[in-house]
């Protein structure tokens, strides 16, 4: 066993093996740059151990591979190279084919484990998505958490299973032709069990502040060791778990005034580590084109960024949301068409709320580098009651929005269960120690005090308690819904749309710098998707009824084949079909039509 840890200099560091043939205390020696190490012959996989700093209490390994008794308990030695991988011929998926499916291990299945999620992979392959995006799995305090309170960044949560269970999930995904991306959180640590700051007090800094308090130290005294820890963690998931990419959480909160941003350094390091092409996405509201430009052009070298403008416009348009960041949008088809053409809406103009410029020019950003959705974990879970968009709009409108997100030239992301219109919410849940838990519950309810429906303290008490087990249980998907209406017909629509994407490259994510979309009045958009000899027209009416002309901007086609409408009987339990002609589509209610043009 090779043991190494990073601590501040001039300390006495011991590794205490609690089991196995070499049980006992073993001193570590300084190895330079704040690191300490030792080699213990005879230690074996399964042995448990902890560190003692300067004669103090035992602490788990900050780089532990497994915490079988939770984040406060001893670490366990894991033989990371003993898993019998079967994916030697795996080469990943083409970025243009990519359809992301975001899921939370704890609520995706009734069991809430890696193994249970692995058994559902054939369903996802049959659905037609290409990439499973796991919400963070790094171990956290308690038995349930969104994952964004992780404190053992190298250890998959024992609440979900053994590390080999995660390896088996990735291995089976590859056998089914599915990529796996992992959401990782480097911008903050969870509030309970973050012992890494006892090993390295320089891990956080007061030089910068974020929404979570003190920032991670990426550019101050001692930051070199912090950066190395994070870079090693990113490579660890690629090397030890064969994941196909990472989604970097809240990169805007990785405050870094150094000459090379951590994100750019991470992208370069990870690509050198991987044996196949990896995908790196960022969650970042700033609409920064530089993040997506190549490093040789002065960019950060990422493959994609979550482009939230698309979601926010649709939500304002169909559900009327107007608080917070939704104030920055009118919620019109014109805004939506602009976003589809550019990849994002704000490209340097002042926002409506702050009058401060946001975003940058997207004219050299590939359309596929914008990741778009009509729901994700944040946009659902950050609502007071965790309601999904399809809980707030009628099914006809939901079907129209679904067609749009799966035919735009950007990379679409689905959130688990949306493909059948899942009845379950996705609420915010935690399992922190009592005092912290009380503070989290109070803070959660205080967050919504300015909302008229929660202005009364009694109303705020009805906001689900994050600490209550029922909040977690209610967020689990209900798989028995798939065979019932209207869920079955909604699922049929998603499967058909994903099959069309798979069969027709013209409907996949685009390598072009600009999309083709037009606003047809305030409530409808018209898109054209072309590649080689194929041409599709997508007409989506998101509000009301009315005629949408097939505008003269389109070359006259000799025939227009109706590929599908959202009012087809297999997709709508109560169909009310639009009238489709070569010159217009007359919608009786919100809906969408996919047409194929033939010369």
Image: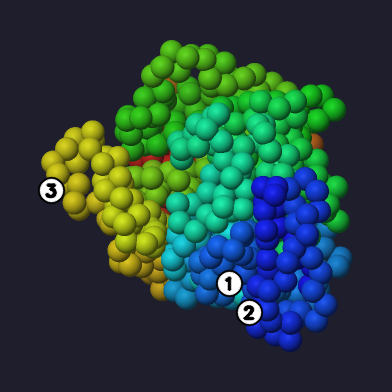
Residue with the most extreme bottom position: 21
Distance Cα–Cα, label 3 vs label 2? 50 Å
Distance Cα–Cα, label 1 vs label 3? 43 Å
Q: Is residue 299 above or below residue 171?
A: above
In the rendered image, which residue does mark 2 sit on?
18
Q: Label 2: state its secondary structure.
A: loop
Kindly identify which numbered label has been placed on residue 458: 3
In the rendered image, which residue does mark 1 sit on?
74
Q: Position of residue 489 (x, y in %)?
A: 44, 61
The reply to whether discs 1 and 2 touch (Cβ–Cβ < 8 Å) is: yes
Q: For mark 1, does the 10 Å Cα neighbourhood hold few (<14), some (14 to 19), or many (20 or more) residues?
A: many
Residue 444 versus residue 152: which sits nearer the camera? 152
At a point 48% along the width and 22% down the height, the residue shown is 334
Q: Nearer the viewer, mark 1 or mark 3?
A: 1
Distance Cα–Cα, label 1 vs label 2? 8 Å
Residue 360: tell me if it is visible.
yes
Q: Is residue 387 above or below residue 209?
A: below
Q: Position of residue 73 (x, y in %)?
A: 53, 71
Examine the image and state in which quarter residue 29 appears.
Answer: bottom right
């Amino acid at each position: 066993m090779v043991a190494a840890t990073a601590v501040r200099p001039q300390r006495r560091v011991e590794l205490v093996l609690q089991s196995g043939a070499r049980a006992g205390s073993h001193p570590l020696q300084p190895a330079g740059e704040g690191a300490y190490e030792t080699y213990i012959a005879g230690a074996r996989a399964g042995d448990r151990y902890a560190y003692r700093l300067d004669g103090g209490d035992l602490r788990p390994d900050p780089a532990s591979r497994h915490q079988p008794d939770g984040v406060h308990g001893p670490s366990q030695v894991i033989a990371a190279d003993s898993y019998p991988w079967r994916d030697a011929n795996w080469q990943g998926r083409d970025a243009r084919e990519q359809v992301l499916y975001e899921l939370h291990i704890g609520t995706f299945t009734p069991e809430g484990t890696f193994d249970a999620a692995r058994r559902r992979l054939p369903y996802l392959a049959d659905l037609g998505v290409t990439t499973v995006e796991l919400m963070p799995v790094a171990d956290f305090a308690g038995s349930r958490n969104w994952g964004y309170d992780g404190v053992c960044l190298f250890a998959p949560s024992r609440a979900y299973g053994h590390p080999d269970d995660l390896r088996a999930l990735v291995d089976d995904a590859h056998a089914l032709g599915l990529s796996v991306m992992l959401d990782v959180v480097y911008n903050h640590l969870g509030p309970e069990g973050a012992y890494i700051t006892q090993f390295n007090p320089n891990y956080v800094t007061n030089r910068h502040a974020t929404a979570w308090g003190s920032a991670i130290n990426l550019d101050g005294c001692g930051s070199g060791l912090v950066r190395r820890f994070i870079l090693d963690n990113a490579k660890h998931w690629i090397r030890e778990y064969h994941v196909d990419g990472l989604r970097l959480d809240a990169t805007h909160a990785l405050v870094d005034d150094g000459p090379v941003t951590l994100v750019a350094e991470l992208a370069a390091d990870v690509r050198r580590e991987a044996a196949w092409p990896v995908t790196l996405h960022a969650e970042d509201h700033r609409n920064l084109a530089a993040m997506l430009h190549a490093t040789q052009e002065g960019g950060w070298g990422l493959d994609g960024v979550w482009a939230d403008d698309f979601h926010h416009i649709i939500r304002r348009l169909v559900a009327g949301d107007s608080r917070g960041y939704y104030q920055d949008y009118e919620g019109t088809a014109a805004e939506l068409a602009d976003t589809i053409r550019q990849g994002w809406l704000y490209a340097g103009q002042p926002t409506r709320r702050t009058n401060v410029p946001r975003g940058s020019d997207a004219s050299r950003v590939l359309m596929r580098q914008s990741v778009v959705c009509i729901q994700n974990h944040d946009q659902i879970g950050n609502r007071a009651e965790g309601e999904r968009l399809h809980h707030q709009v009628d099914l006809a409108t939901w079907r129209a929005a679904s067609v749009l997100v799966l035919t735009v030239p950007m990379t679409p992301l689905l959130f688990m269960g949306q493909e059948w219109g899942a009845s379950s919410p996705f609420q915010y849940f935690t399992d922190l120690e009592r005092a912290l838990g009380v503070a989290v519950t109070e803070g959660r309810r205080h967050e919504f005090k300015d909302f008229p429906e929660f202005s009364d303290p009694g109303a705020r008490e009805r906001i689900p308690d994050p600490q209550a087990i029922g909040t977690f249980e209610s967020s689990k998907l209900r798989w028995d819904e798939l065979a019932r209406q209207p869920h079955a017909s909604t699922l049929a629509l998603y499967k058909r749309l994903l099959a069309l994407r798979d069969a027709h490259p013209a409907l996949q994510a685009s390598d072009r710098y600009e999309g083709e979309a037009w606003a047809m009045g305030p409530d409808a958009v018209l898109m054209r998707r072309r590649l080689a000899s194929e041409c599709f027209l997508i007409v989506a009416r998101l509000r009301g009824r009315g005629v949408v002309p097939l505008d003269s901007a389109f070359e006259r086609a000799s025939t227009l084949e109706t590929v599908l409408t959202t009012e087809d009987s297999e997709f709508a339990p109560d169909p009310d079909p639009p009238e489709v002609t070569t010159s217009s589509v007359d919608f009786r209610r919100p809906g969408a039509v996919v047409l194929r043009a033939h010369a």
